[in-house]
Image: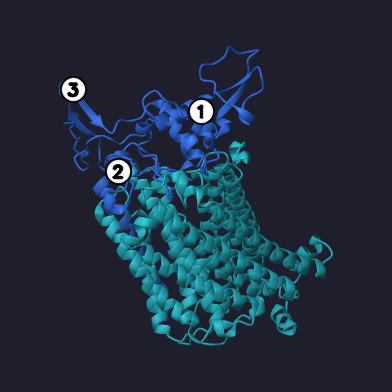
Chain colours: A cyan, B blue
Amino acid sequence: MSAKVTPITRPDAVDASCRWPVLKLTLGATAWLLAGLMLKLGSGLMLHLPALAICEYANYGKLAAAARVALIYGFALPAGFGIGIWLLFRNSDRPLTSGLAVLAGAVIWNLGVTAGVAGILLGEGSGIVGFDFPGYSGSILLAGYFLMGVAVIPAYGAGQRKEMELSQVMVLAAALWFPWLLTSAQILLVWFPVRGVLSALVGGWYFQALLWGCLAPLTLAGLLHFRTGLNGASLPRPALAWFGWWGLLAVAGFVGATTLIGGPYPAWVASAGVVAGVLLSLPVILLGLNLFAGGLARHAGQPALQLATVSGLSFVIVGLLSAATSLRCANRILRFSMFPGGLQDLFLFGFLTLGLLAGLYVILPRLIGFAWQQPLLTYAHIGLSVMGVGLMVLSLLVGGWQQGQRLDSVALSVSQVNAGLWKFMLLNALGLVILIGGQMAFVAHVAWLVGRHFPTVKEFVLSLIREDVRPAAALVRSAK
Amino acid sequence: MNQGPLIFLGVLTTLSASWLGLVSVPRLQLGGLAPHPSTNETGLVTYAPVERDGSARQGADIYRAQGCAECHTQQVRPSSEGSDLARGWGQRRSVARDYVFEAPVQLGVSRLGPDLANYGERLGTNALPWMRLYHPASLANNASTWCPGAPYLFEVRDLKWHTASPDALVLAGVKAPKAGFEIVPTLRAWQLAAYLGSLRQSVELPEAALPPKTEVP
């Protein structure tokens, strides 16, 4: 019996097969990132300038929830899916043969996000943090995802012949977790809603599992890939990395219990939260060790690696701080302060956003066929992003610590506690403005590149359609 | 080696474990919770908690839609977990039975504003929270509030076409309406007020006793 020989596809051909669906996912995600940051800025303005709160469709609560949906479902998930798809097929030397289905799925997904944001602003949000969108939006998101997932996973599985790398396994696992999570949440929160505290329990389980079990692996997959792919350096402790990965997956589903400590639940739920929070530190340390030991930070000469370094560092810090704050002594003080918001911003902006943007720095030149050519814009993007995220997170962590201690003391009224918060809130808003400035630089860079090579958008689109295989990698190399 | 089945099994196991732990088991434990019956001195059987009336239920929808839970919690933690009881936000800790009629429950995640689990108790029986909804910063003890209020739940009425309402807000300064006009709560403001007034957890439950009343000598 003769062994079946699997044809190897050239990297340029793999890039060409991924071009349209991945561009749709990642460029759409970039637009949602800007929209989400604007919504977040709008919600902050409502706090600083209450006189603006004259419009029912744009109050603080609605804008904050809409920003969350735009950033998580509009930016982080599609960007993660796009980078994940590219990474899966590029590493397996196989072309994406179901690009049209992925493209259609991405369009439906974006419709779902748009419906979700609009629904929240119209007052139809679910009121459950992390699952803020209306039920119909969740159904559209599910339809979009299934179209993408059904197109990609079997196609990838059928073509896979090599031993899978850790980054590929992470993407696949996240791709399998996500539909189960979202379907479960849709069933229990929308179609056959559970009552009472169970709805908060399901919501907490869903949101934290989404963050740690889907979004974290999608981002980590990119970081590990860049570490090995761009540097040519192998993982220093591959066995520990695999152990850390499975550990993260095992704990991720229980991290939701950390957000329920002290609430109206049976005592064992709080105990499970403390245990899950503390256990989370172990996979975070193991994966952090593999990211940084002799690798990522030492080769931070490229934009992608600079962003990936900050992203990896944010992952380790947020993991360790989450573990520390799940301890009862800390939870008592920080539970309802701005501190958890600071941790969430560190996760969402420091880890996810910067990590996924690092991925875009790698894959966009390979997809559109020309390299980044404005170092000033790149430095502005990276510098402003890191500065903005740092200011946002530090202001919330320090302000939250102070707020928590004051709230724990009955000597001060809530109004008196609030009086000490304005400077932290102002710094947070300033950080957000700086972060938005950084993303503007990134968008300007992409627009400049496209505009320089193609006088009109039509010409750009036509060129992408006409040329099946662009020598993008060669262009990237020559630009260096 | 084909690692697909191994990955699938690993993903299935890890997700199922958390599903069992945080969704299925709590559902078995708490899914059957019902209001607790008790008999008062006249022999009348009452249940706690009480289901809200239609107006308060619509108010709950407004509370959810406006995203009030972004800044207000509705859960009183035990003394070991925080100073909620010492702050007077409730007489006892909140328990799962307090929320059996709520879907979805609005427990909240942040306290930029005070906890509202027993706001109805603090408000009193006949008081209405109009100024707190219309312009919270105007309240004497609330100058540093972050709450922007919800003035869109009120309407400006021309007194040429309406008789003066007893519920019109008494406002001074820049917030005062022009002469010949008044600002009154809309139906939705009444519904939200009904919901806020219904936020009460000071009833004795088997799993959450009220503190003993101190007798005045």
Q: Earlier in the sequence, mark 1 or mark 3?
A: 3
Please name the amino acid that badge 3 sits on: Leu
- Residue A351 horizontal/vertical position (percent): 52, 68
- Residue B210 horizontal/vertical position (percent): 22, 38
Contact (Cβ within 8 Å) of mark 1 with mark 3: no
Nearer to us: label 2 or label 3:
2
- The numbered mark at residue B44 is 3
Kindly identify the residue that appears in the image at 44 percent across and 81 percent down. Answer: A289
**From mark 2 to mark 1, how far is it between C-alphas?**
28 Å
Contact (Cβ within 8 Å) of mark 2 with mark 1: no
Is label 3 in a helix, a strand or a loop? loop
Assign the C terminus of chain A to one quadrant of the image.
bottom right
Is label 1 in a helix, a strand or a loop? helix
**From mark 1 to mark 3, how far is it between C-alphas?**
34 Å
- Residue to which mark 2 is pinned: B94
Q: Earlier in the sequence, mark 2 or mark 1?
A: 2
Chain letter of mark 1 equals B
> Can you see residue B64?
yes
Chain letter of mark 3 equals B
Q: Are marks 1 and 3 on the same chain?
A: yes
Does residue A333 appear left or right of residue A388 in this picture? left
- Residue to which mark 1 is pinned: B188
Assign the N terminus of chain A to one quadrant of the image.
bottom left
Q: Nearer the viewer, residue A193 or B210?
A: B210
Does residue B76 appear left or right of residue A112 in this picture? left
Kindly identify the residue that appears in the image at 32 percent across and 30 percent down. Answer: B51
Residue A182 sits in which quadrant? bottom left
- Residue A453 horizontal/vertical position (percent): 81, 70
Q: Nearer the viewer, residue A176 or A354?
A: A354
Q: Residues within 10 Å of mark 1 (few under 14, many from 20)?
A: some
- Residue A135 horizontal/vertical position (percent): 48, 44
Kindly identify the residue that appears in the image at 24 percent across and 48 percent down. Answer: B29
